[in-house]
Amino acid sequence: MSAVTGIPWYRLAAIDQYERTITIANPKKRERSAPVVSIVVEPPQWAGMLNPDMSDNNPKSIRLFNGIGRDGSGDNRAERNNDFDLLYSVATFIGSYGVQEEDFANGLWNYYQNSRAVQRIRQFAKIYERFDQLNLKDRAFPLPIQSIYSYRSTFGMGRHYGGYRIHEGTDIFARHGVPVRSTCYGVVEIKGWNRYGGWRIGIRDTDNLYHYYAHLSGFQKDLKEGDIVSPGQVIGWVGSSGYGKPGTQGKFPPHLHFGIYRDRGLIEYAFDPYPSLKQWESTDHRKLRKNKKSS
Protein backbone atom coordinates (compact mmCIF):
# COMPACT_ATOMS: atom_id res chain seq x y z
CA MET A 1 0.00 0.00 0.00
CA SER A 2 2.94 2.32 0.64
CA ALA A 3 4.21 1.69 -2.89
CA VAL A 4 0.78 2.33 -4.39
CA THR A 5 -0.02 5.54 -2.48
CA GLY A 6 3.45 6.99 -1.96
CA ILE A 7 2.89 7.24 1.80
CA PRO A 8 5.69 5.63 3.86
CA TRP A 9 4.68 2.44 5.66
CA TYR A 10 5.33 3.93 9.09
CA ARG A 11 2.77 6.68 8.48
CA LEU A 12 0.14 4.21 7.33
CA ALA A 13 0.93 2.06 10.38
CA ALA A 14 0.60 5.11 12.62
CA ILE A 15 -2.87 5.90 11.26
CA ASP A 16 -4.00 2.31 11.77
CA GLN A 17 -2.52 2.15 15.27
CA TYR A 18 -4.13 5.43 16.33
CA GLU A 19 -7.51 4.15 15.17
CA ARG A 20 -6.93 0.90 17.06
CA THR A 21 -6.21 2.76 20.31
CA ILE A 22 -9.32 4.93 19.95
CA THR A 23 -11.48 1.84 19.43
CA ILE A 24 -9.96 0.24 22.54
CA ALA A 25 -10.73 3.41 24.52
CA ASN A 26 -14.29 3.67 23.13
CA PRO A 27 -15.43 0.06 22.59
CA LYS A 28 -19.15 0.87 22.84
CA LYS A 29 -19.05 3.74 20.35
CA ARG A 30 -16.84 2.29 17.63
CA GLU A 31 -17.09 -0.93 15.67
CA ARG A 32 -14.27 -2.06 13.43
CA SER A 33 -15.17 -2.15 9.75
CA ALA A 34 -12.60 -4.67 8.45
CA PRO A 35 -10.95 -7.85 9.80
CA VAL A 36 -7.35 -6.58 9.98
CA VAL A 37 -7.20 -2.85 9.40
CA SER A 38 -8.40 -0.95 12.47
CA ILE A 39 -9.50 2.23 10.72
CA VAL A 40 -13.19 3.02 11.22
CA VAL A 41 -15.00 4.97 8.51
CA GLU A 42 -18.68 5.71 9.07
CA PRO A 43 -21.08 5.08 6.13
CA PRO A 44 -21.82 8.78 5.40
CA GLN A 45 -18.12 9.52 5.12
CA TRP A 46 -17.52 6.43 3.00
CA ALA A 47 -20.46 6.70 0.62
CA GLY A 48 -21.00 10.48 0.74
CA MET A 49 -23.27 12.54 2.95
CA LEU A 50 -25.94 13.01 0.26
CA ASN A 51 -25.75 9.48 -1.12
CA PRO A 52 -29.21 7.88 -0.84
CA ASP A 53 -27.56 4.47 -0.50
CA MET A 54 -25.34 4.32 2.58
CA SER A 55 -24.30 0.78 1.66
CA ASP A 56 -23.14 1.88 -1.81
CA ASN A 57 -19.99 0.06 -2.97
CA ASN A 58 -19.81 1.45 -6.49
CA PRO A 59 -16.63 3.60 -6.70
CA LYS A 60 -18.14 5.82 -9.41
CA SER A 61 -21.32 6.74 -7.56
CA ILE A 62 -19.41 7.11 -4.28
CA ARG A 63 -17.08 9.60 -5.94
CA LEU A 64 -20.09 11.40 -7.42
CA PHE A 65 -21.39 12.01 -3.89
CA ASN A 66 -17.91 12.99 -2.61
CA GLY A 67 -17.47 9.88 -0.47
CA ILE A 68 -13.95 8.70 0.27
CA GLY A 69 -14.59 5.03 -0.60
CA ARG A 70 -12.22 3.69 -3.27
CA ASP A 71 -11.38 0.32 -4.80
CA GLY A 72 -8.04 -0.81 -3.43
CA SER A 73 -8.33 -4.52 -4.18
CA GLY A 74 -9.03 -4.29 -7.90
CA ASP A 75 -12.48 -5.91 -7.89
CA ASN A 76 -14.31 -2.74 -8.99
CA ARG A 77 -16.04 -2.45 -5.61
CA ALA A 78 -15.35 -0.08 -2.72
CA GLU A 79 -16.26 -1.98 0.44
CA ARG A 80 -15.76 -0.71 3.99
CA ASN A 81 -15.22 -4.27 5.25
CA ASN A 82 -12.39 -4.93 2.78
CA ASP A 83 -8.97 -4.25 4.31
CA PHE A 84 -7.39 -3.18 1.03
CA ASP A 85 -10.25 -0.87 0.08
CA LEU A 86 -10.38 0.66 3.55
CA LEU A 87 -6.67 1.41 3.87
CA TYR A 88 -6.34 2.55 0.27
CA SER A 89 -9.30 4.92 0.59
CA VAL A 90 -8.04 6.67 3.70
CA ALA A 91 -4.46 6.77 2.39
CA THR A 92 -5.66 8.23 -0.91
CA PHE A 93 -7.62 10.98 0.85
CA ILE A 94 -4.75 11.94 3.16
CA GLY A 95 -2.14 11.54 0.44
CA SER A 96 -4.03 13.88 -1.87
CA TYR A 97 -2.58 16.78 0.13
CA GLY A 98 1.01 15.82 -0.73
CA VAL A 99 3.81 13.50 0.35
CA GLN A 100 5.98 15.74 2.52
CA GLU A 101 5.76 15.73 6.33
CA GLU A 102 3.76 18.95 6.54
CA ASP A 103 1.52 17.79 3.69
CA PHE A 104 0.85 14.61 5.66
CA ALA A 105 -0.07 16.68 8.72
CA ASN A 106 -2.38 18.80 6.58
CA GLY A 107 -4.05 15.68 5.19
CA LEU A 108 -4.53 14.29 8.69
CA TRP A 109 -6.13 17.52 9.85
CA ASN A 110 -8.56 17.58 6.95
CA TYR A 111 -9.50 13.96 7.60
CA TYR A 112 -9.81 14.01 11.41
CA GLN A 113 -10.49 17.71 12.13
CA ASN A 114 -8.80 17.01 15.47
CA SER A 115 -5.38 18.42 16.38
CA ARG A 116 -4.84 15.69 19.00
CA ALA A 117 -5.28 13.00 16.35
CA VAL A 118 -2.76 14.75 14.11
CA GLN A 119 -0.25 14.97 16.96
CA ARG A 120 -0.67 11.33 18.01
CA ILE A 121 -0.32 9.91 14.50
CA ARG A 122 2.78 11.99 13.81
CA GLN A 123 4.27 10.79 17.10
CA PHE A 124 3.55 7.14 16.30
CA ALA A 125 5.01 7.53 12.81
CA LYS A 126 8.17 9.02 14.27
CA ILE A 127 8.57 6.08 16.66
CA TYR A 128 7.93 3.45 13.96
CA GLU A 129 10.35 5.17 11.60
CA ARG A 130 13.08 5.25 14.27
CA PHE A 131 12.87 1.57 15.19
CA ASP A 132 11.76 0.32 11.75
CA GLN A 133 9.33 -2.22 13.21
CA LEU A 134 5.87 -2.55 14.73
CA ASN A 135 6.75 -4.88 17.61
CA LEU A 136 7.48 -2.31 20.31
CA LYS A 137 5.71 -3.92 23.26
CA ASP A 138 8.67 -4.29 25.64
CA ARG A 139 8.30 -2.44 28.93
CA ALA A 140 10.57 -1.69 31.91
CA PHE A 141 10.02 -0.88 35.57
CA PRO A 142 10.62 2.87 36.06
CA LEU A 143 13.38 2.34 38.65
CA PRO A 144 16.33 -0.08 38.47
CA ILE A 145 15.13 -3.17 40.28
CA GLN A 146 18.54 -3.49 41.96
CA SER A 147 17.84 -0.22 43.80
CA ILE A 148 16.06 0.10 47.13
CA TYR A 149 12.45 1.20 46.70
CA SER A 150 8.94 0.51 47.96
CA TYR A 151 5.45 1.13 46.65
CA ARG A 152 1.83 0.11 47.02
CA SER A 153 -1.39 0.98 45.24
CA THR A 154 -2.20 4.62 46.01
CA PHE A 155 -4.47 5.36 43.06
CA GLY A 156 -7.61 7.30 44.04
CA MET A 157 -6.40 8.46 47.43
CA GLY A 158 -7.10 12.08 48.39
CA ARG A 159 -4.73 14.99 47.80
CA HIS A 160 -5.20 18.45 49.26
CA TYR A 161 -2.49 20.72 47.86
CA GLY A 162 -4.12 23.10 45.37
CA GLY A 163 -7.61 21.94 46.35
CA TYR A 164 -9.04 18.50 46.92
CA ARG A 165 -8.25 16.02 44.13
CA ILE A 166 -7.58 12.32 43.82
CA HIS A 167 -4.18 10.73 43.41
CA GLU A 168 -3.88 9.70 39.76
CA GLY A 169 -0.93 7.33 40.02
CA THR A 170 1.38 5.26 42.19
CA ASP A 171 4.13 6.66 44.43
CA ILE A 172 7.39 4.70 44.37
CA PHE A 173 9.55 5.74 47.30
CA ALA A 174 13.31 5.61 46.83
CA ARG A 175 16.45 7.50 47.75
CA HIS A 176 17.09 10.89 46.26
CA GLY A 177 18.99 10.54 42.97
CA VAL A 178 17.95 7.00 42.03
CA PRO A 179 17.70 6.85 38.20
CA VAL A 180 14.23 7.08 36.68
CA ARG A 181 13.81 5.10 33.46
CA SER A 182 11.42 5.18 30.55
CA THR A 183 8.93 2.35 30.89
CA CYS A 184 8.26 2.16 27.14
CA TYR A 185 9.16 2.96 23.58
CA GLY A 186 7.76 6.42 23.10
CA VAL A 187 8.20 10.11 22.41
CA VAL A 188 8.82 12.79 25.02
CA GLU A 189 5.63 14.83 24.85
CA ILE A 190 6.27 17.26 27.68
CA LYS A 191 9.17 18.14 29.97
CA GLY A 192 9.51 20.88 32.57
CA TRP A 193 7.96 22.26 35.73
CA ASN A 194 4.45 21.74 37.05
CA ARG A 195 3.38 23.21 40.41
CA TYR A 196 1.91 19.86 41.46
CA GLY A 197 4.37 17.43 39.89
CA GLY A 198 7.51 19.53 40.11
CA TRP A 199 10.08 18.57 37.52
CA ARG A 200 8.14 16.10 35.39
CA ILE A 201 8.25 14.28 32.07
CA GLY A 202 5.38 12.91 29.97
CA ILE A 203 6.04 10.17 27.40
CA ARG A 204 3.52 8.90 24.82
CA ASP A 205 3.78 5.26 23.71
CA THR A 206 2.35 3.61 20.59
CA ASP A 207 -0.61 2.28 22.57
CA ASN A 208 -1.59 5.94 22.97
CA LEU A 209 -0.87 5.79 26.68
CA TYR A 210 0.70 8.79 28.38
CA HIS A 211 3.36 7.79 30.95
CA TYR A 212 3.79 10.51 33.57
CA TYR A 213 6.88 10.82 35.81
CA ALA A 214 6.79 13.50 38.52
CA HIS A 215 8.75 14.98 41.47
CA LEU A 216 12.09 14.44 39.72
CA SER A 217 15.28 16.03 41.03
CA GLY A 218 16.51 16.59 37.48
CA PHE A 219 16.43 15.43 33.87
CA GLN A 220 18.84 13.36 31.83
CA LYS A 221 21.21 15.70 30.02
CA ASP A 222 20.14 16.72 26.50
CA LEU A 223 16.70 15.02 26.77
CA LYS A 224 14.15 17.27 25.09
CA GLU A 225 10.56 17.28 23.92
CA GLY A 226 10.14 15.26 20.74
CA ASP A 227 12.97 12.83 21.55
CA ILE A 228 12.38 9.11 21.10
CA VAL A 229 13.11 6.87 24.10
CA SER A 230 13.37 3.14 24.76
CA PRO A 231 12.40 0.97 27.75
CA GLY A 232 15.01 1.25 30.48
CA GLN A 233 16.54 4.47 29.16
CA VAL A 234 17.39 6.90 31.97
CA ILE A 235 15.29 10.07 31.70
CA GLY A 236 15.85 11.64 35.14
CA TRP A 237 16.33 11.02 38.86
CA VAL A 238 14.12 10.58 41.91
CA GLY A 239 13.54 13.76 43.89
CA SER A 240 11.02 15.68 45.96
CA SER A 241 10.20 18.60 43.69
CA GLY A 242 6.80 20.24 43.44
CA TYR A 243 3.98 21.81 45.43
CA GLY A 244 5.14 25.35 44.74
CA LYS A 245 6.98 27.70 42.41
CA PRO A 246 9.72 26.36 40.09
CA GLY A 247 12.53 24.78 42.07
CA THR A 248 10.50 23.99 45.20
CA GLN A 249 11.94 20.89 46.88
CA GLY A 250 11.55 18.87 50.06
CA LYS A 251 7.87 19.23 50.96
CA PHE A 252 7.59 15.42 51.07
CA PRO A 253 9.96 12.41 51.08
CA PRO A 254 11.74 11.69 47.79
CA HIS A 255 9.73 9.46 45.49
CA LEU A 256 8.64 8.98 41.91
CA HIS A 257 5.00 9.63 41.13
CA PHE A 258 4.13 7.45 38.14
CA GLY A 259 0.83 7.69 36.30
CA ILE A 260 -0.71 6.36 33.10
CA TYR A 261 -3.42 8.10 31.07
CA ARG A 262 -5.45 6.73 28.16
CA ASP A 263 -6.46 8.97 25.27
CA ARG A 264 -10.12 8.69 24.20
CA GLY A 265 -9.77 11.06 21.25
CA LEU A 266 -10.86 14.32 22.85
CA ILE A 267 -10.04 13.72 26.52
CA GLU A 268 -7.67 11.57 28.57
CA TYR A 269 -8.37 9.69 31.76
CA ALA A 270 -6.08 8.18 34.37
CA PHE A 271 -6.21 4.53 35.39
CA ASP A 272 -4.41 2.61 38.10
CA PRO A 273 -0.81 1.86 37.00
CA TYR A 274 -0.14 -0.50 39.91
CA PRO A 275 -0.94 -3.77 38.04
CA SER A 276 1.32 -2.72 35.16
CA LEU A 277 4.12 -1.79 37.56
CA LYS A 278 3.95 -5.20 39.23
CA GLN A 279 4.05 -6.92 35.85
CA TRP A 280 7.02 -4.87 34.61
CA GLU A 281 8.85 -5.39 37.90
CA SER A 282 8.38 -9.15 37.64
CA THR A 283 9.58 -9.18 34.02
CA ASP A 284 12.70 -7.18 34.91
CA HIS A 285 13.48 -9.59 37.76
CA ARG A 286 13.26 -12.53 35.34
CA LYS A 287 15.55 -10.78 32.88
CA LEU A 288 18.05 -10.06 35.65
CA ARG A 289 18.07 -13.69 36.81
CA LYS A 290 18.48 -14.89 33.21
CA ASN A 291 21.41 -12.54 32.65
CA LYS A 292 23.09 -13.71 35.84
CA LYS A 293 22.74 -17.35 34.81
CA SER A 294 24.08 -16.70 31.31
CA SER A 295 27.10 -14.84 32.70
Image (cartoon, helix red, strand yellow):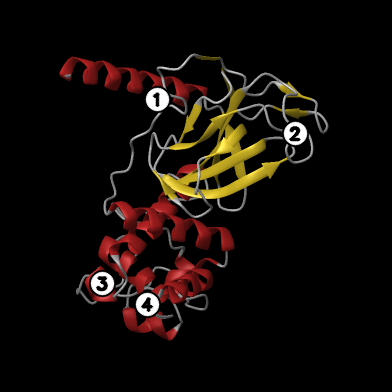
Q: Earlier in the sequence, mark 4 or mark 1?
A: 4
Q: Which residue, given by chain and number where applicable, does mark 4 sit on?
A: 99
Which element is circle 1 on? helix
Which element is circle 2 on? loop
Compared across the picture, whether 221 is left or right of 283 comes to right
Instruction: Say whether residue 214 is visible.
Output: no
Q: Which residue, given by chain and number where applicable, does mark 1 sit on?
A: 280
Numbered badge on residue 136: none
Point out the image quarter for the N terminus: bottom left
| The image quarter in which residue 81 lies | bottom left
The mark total stands at 4
Residue at 64% across / 38% down in the picture?
199
284 up-or-down from 86: above or below: above
Discs 2, 1 touching: Cβ within 8 Å: no
Q: Which residue, given by chain and number where applicable, does mark 2 sit on?
A: 248
Q: Nearer the viewer, mark 2 or mark 3?
A: 2
Which element is circle 4 on? loop
The alpha-carbon separation of the residues under discs 4 and 3 comes to: 19 Å
In the picture as drawn, the residue positioned furthest to the left comes out as 294
The alpha-carbon separation of the residues under discs 2 and 1 comes to: 31 Å
Q: Nearer the viewer, residue 99 or 289?
A: 289
Q: Nearer the viewer, mark 1 or mark 3?
A: 1
Q: Nearer the viewer, residue 95 or 79?
A: 95
Q: Which residue, given by chain and number where applicable, does mark 3 sit on?
A: 72
